[in-house]
Image (spheres, rainbow, N blue to C red):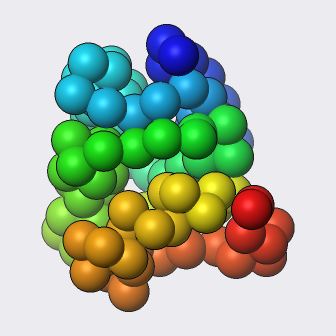
Amino acid sequence: MSLSVSSKQVGGEAVLQIAGDIDAHSSSKLRRELAGLFDASLQVIRVQLDGVEHMDSSGVATLSEGVLWSRRTGGHFILSGLSRSVTDVLELAKLDDVFEVDRSQGERV
């Protein structure tokens, strides 16, 4: 499945809606979208992953850049809408506690 990324900005927050698989073939597209936001004057970048069914290590690496951005700038890089498979990948990489995850939407199974 190809990757679809849409974004909107409201005040100091950007929201990225992701759909499709984040893998070695598509992670560069997500990286380009995020890079533009990292350079902007934002306080929060929220990545909605409810449309993502599969993510491999290249996707984890791309999202990890958001953690680095948040540590450098004091901003918040928030993941939300995680499917069980995406949660499993983060847990397997032992990064589930590294990311700021909004669990208010509940985990998708």
Task: Say left or right for 28 vs 9.
Answer: left
Q: Residue at x 21, y 41 (%)?
A: 58
Q: Nearer the viewer, residue 67 or 9?
A: 67
Task: Say left or right for 32 vs 86.
Answer: left
- Against 108, residue 57 (above or below) is above
Q: Is residue 46 visible?
A: no
Q: Nearer the viewer, residue 77 or 91?
A: 91
Q: Nearer the viewer, residue 108 or 73?
A: 108
- In the rendered image, residue 53, in percent from the top left (x then y), is placed at 58, 41
Q: Is residue 93 visible?
A: yes
- Against 60, residue 79 (above or below) is below
- In the rendered image, residue 4, in percent from the top left (x then y), is placed at 56, 18
Q: Nearer the viewer, residue 36 or 67?
A: 67
Q: Specify the quadrant that holds the C terminus.
A: bottom right
- In the rendered image, residue 100, in percent from the top left (x then y), is placed at 47, 76
- In the rendered image, residue 103, in percent from the top left (x then y), is placed at 70, 76
Q: Residue at x 37, y 68 (%)?
A: 90
Q: Residue at x 64, y 57 (%)?
A: 83
Q: Residue at x 61, y 63 (%)?
A: 84
Residue farthest right in this picture: 105
